Image (cartoon, helix red, strand yellow):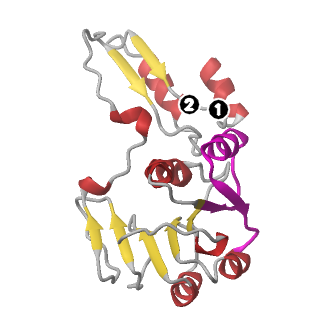
């Protein structure tokens, strides 16, 4: 799919990525990698969202992304009725809403992680899995590891000069919505085979998770 430059707001490339404290912010974080490339190619990008952490809101605003909050699926369909290209990264939209969007926007792109039952029809499917093929229909499917999005801060490879023996790095997402990190740490700190734990979380973690980790 070729992305052409547009000047009008209605012709801006649009992305819908769902996020909240309850489900985490992984959808938005994944799309940031694509947004970086689009902005570098001088495309205008509008991100539609239901909820957004203040840190992410500030980061995207500084990048030059136009942000629009939508209250429900009806508002989403209405606001995007004239979009040229819409990229959807979400697990919670109804099949009915996806069908409506397919009939209203000019080109509908879906990031397929095997969530939606179907088959549904899209204009382009991106499925980063190298194990499970997409069940949906599209003139073009980008399938496999080559289509996993990597943000710029992770792209540069730095060879490590030394390794810390018996050390473990833990990251279950910045938000860790299921609060699994404290339980995992508790199991590991009891092991004599582990000398160091490094845990990566963000300030969007729940207070109870952070308190458990501090203890």
Q: Which residue is mark 2?
A: 201
Residue 110 appears at what percent x and percent y? 44, 71
Which numbered dot is residue 209?
1
User: Residue 190: image x %, image y %?
Assistant: 44, 16
**In this picture, residue 117 sits left or right of residue 45:** left
How crowded is the residue under tag 2: few (<14 C-alpha within 10 Å), some, or many (20+)?
A: some
Q: Nearer the viewer, mark 2 or mark 1?
A: 2
Residue 63 on the magenta segment: yes
In-front residue for pair 43/204: 43
x then y, percent, for residue 136: 35, 80
Question: Few, some or many C-alpha atoms within 10 Å of disc 1 (few <14, some 14-19, many ≥20)?
Answer: some
Q: Residue at x 64, y 77 (%)?
A: 80
Q: Is residue 89 shown left or right of residue 132?
A: right
- Locate the N terminus by quadrant: bottom left
Q: Tell me how far mark 2 sits from mark 1, CA to CA.
A: 10 Å
| Residue extending farthest bottom | 103
Tally of marks: 2
Q: Which residues are magenta?
A: 46-72
């Amino acid at each position: 799919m070729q992305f052409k430059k547009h000047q009008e707001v209605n012709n801006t490339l649009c992305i819908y990525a769902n996020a909240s404290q309850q489900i985490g912010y992984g959808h938005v974080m994944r799309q940031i990698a694509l947004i970086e490339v689009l902005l570098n190619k001088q495309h205008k990008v509008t991100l539609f969202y239901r909820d957004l952490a203040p840190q992410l809101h500030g980061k995207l605003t500084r990048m030059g992304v136009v942000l629009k909050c939508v209250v429900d699926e009806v508002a989403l369909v209405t606001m995007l009725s004239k979009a040229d290209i819409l990229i959807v990264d979400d697990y919670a939209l109804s099949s009915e809403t996806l069908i409506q969007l397919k009939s209203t926007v000019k080109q509908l792109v879906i990031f397929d992680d095997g969530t939606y039952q179907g088959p549904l029809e899209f204009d382009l499917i991106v499925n980063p899995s190298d194990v499970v093929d997409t069940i949906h229909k599209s003139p073009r499917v980008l399938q496999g590891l080559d289509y996993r999005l990597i943000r710029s801060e992770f792209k540069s490879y730095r060879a490590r000069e030394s390794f810390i023996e018996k050390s473990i790095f833990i990251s279950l997402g910045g938000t860790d919505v299921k609060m699994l990190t404290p339980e995992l740490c508790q199991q590991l700190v009891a092991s004599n085979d582990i000398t160091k734990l490094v845990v990566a979380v963000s300030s969007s973690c729940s207070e109870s998770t952070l308190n458990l980790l501090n203890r």
